[in-house]
């Protein structure tokens, strides 16, 4: 969920459309500052959600769906249950810190990249995170000391949506669910940064506090 070009201080909240509006906020924003965050939201009985603008002004909203939880209907008989979609919490582990040169080899920038920067980093087989049957990870990501305004996406794909938005010299963190690349022997994910110039750089921190299992045969 991304708040774009808000005209006043405020917040967004999102909830099933047939329920009362909660007091909790998903995003807090300030005028002219784009802010993104990830959340899990239930659907109303009509399969709809409501997004509430808790400000006195206007704000554009971008809603990107990254996945869903499927309801399993058990009808009896012999059923081969799997762990697909099961969430496993772990003690938080830092898998990337470019300030210290691990996970990725230093500050992210545009040297050697065309139009947009992409960097893959290992997510499987680290600490309590398995490499086999790894579907996705719950993580806290932080952009540290960026020298340009921009956004970043965490996904093995092309990276067309934002997971986090940042301003110049602003340290900003967001909770995300980050998919692992199921085609790589060593499970990886990827950060994508938008088009910029060769002078851009930022540091990145990724802390993982749980993971989701893929189905097992």
Image: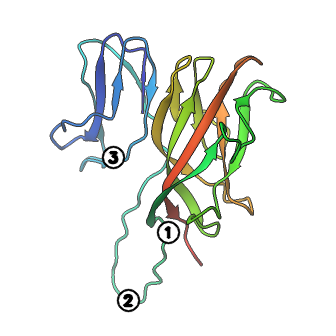
Q: Which residue is mark 3?
A: 41
Q: Position of residue 31 (x, y in %)?
A: 37, 12
Instruction: Give the structural element (helix, strand or loop) at label 1.
Output: loop
| Image side of residue 106 versus residue 40, left or right | right
Q: State the residue in front, 21 or 45.
A: 21
Q: State the residue in front, 132 or 209.
A: 209
Outermost residue to the left = 20
| Sequence order check, earlier mark of 2 and 1 | 2
Q: Is residue 202 above or below residue 209?
A: above
Q: Which residue is mark 2?
A: 77
Q: Position of residue 195 (x, y in %)?
A: 69, 22
Q: Residue at x 66, y 54 (%)?
A: 181
One can see residue 50 in this view: no
One can see residue 126 in this view: yes
Q: Nearer the viewer, mark 2 or mark 1?
A: 1
Q: Where residue 95 is drawn, which disc sits there?
A: none
| Sequence order check, earlier mark of 3 and 1 | 3
Q: Which residue is mark 1?
A: 84
Q: State the residue in front, 27 or 159.
A: 27
Looking at the rendered structure, the number of numbered marks drawn on it comes to 3
Q: Residue at x 33, y 46 (%)?
A: 41
Callout 2: 10 Å neighbours few (<14), some, many (20+)? few
Instruction: Name the quadrant of the N terminus.
Output: top left
What's the CA distance linking mark 2 and mark 1? 20 Å
Callout 3: 10 Å neighbours few (<14), some, many (20+)? few
């Amino acid at each position: 969920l991304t708040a774009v070009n808000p005209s006043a201080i405020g917040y967004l909240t999102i909830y099933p459309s047939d329920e009362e509006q909660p007091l909790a906020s998903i995003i807090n924003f300030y005028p002219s500052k784009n802010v993104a965050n990830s959340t899990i939201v239930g659907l109303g009985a009509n399969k709809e959600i409501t997004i509430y603008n808790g400000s006195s002004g206007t704000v554009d909203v971008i809603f990107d769906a990254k996945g869903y939880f499927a309801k399993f209907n058990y009808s009896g008989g012999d059923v081969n249950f799997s762990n697909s979609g099961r969430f496993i919490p772990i003690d938080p582990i830092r898998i990337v810190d470019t300030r210290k040169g691990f996970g990725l080899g230093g500050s992210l920038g545009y040297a050697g990249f065309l139009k947009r920067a992409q960097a893959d980093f290992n997510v499987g087989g680290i600490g309590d995170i398995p490499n086999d049957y790894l579907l996705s990870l719950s993580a806290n990501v932080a952009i540290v000391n960026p020298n340009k305004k921009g956004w970043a996406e965490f996904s093995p794909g092309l990276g067309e949506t934002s997971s986090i938005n940042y301003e110049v010299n602003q340290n900003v963190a967001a909770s995300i669910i980050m998919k692992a690349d199921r085609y790589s022997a060593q499970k990886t994910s990827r950060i994508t940064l938008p088009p910029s110039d060769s002078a851009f750089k930022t540091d990145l921190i990724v802390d993982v506090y749980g993971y989701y299992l893929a189905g097992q045969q």
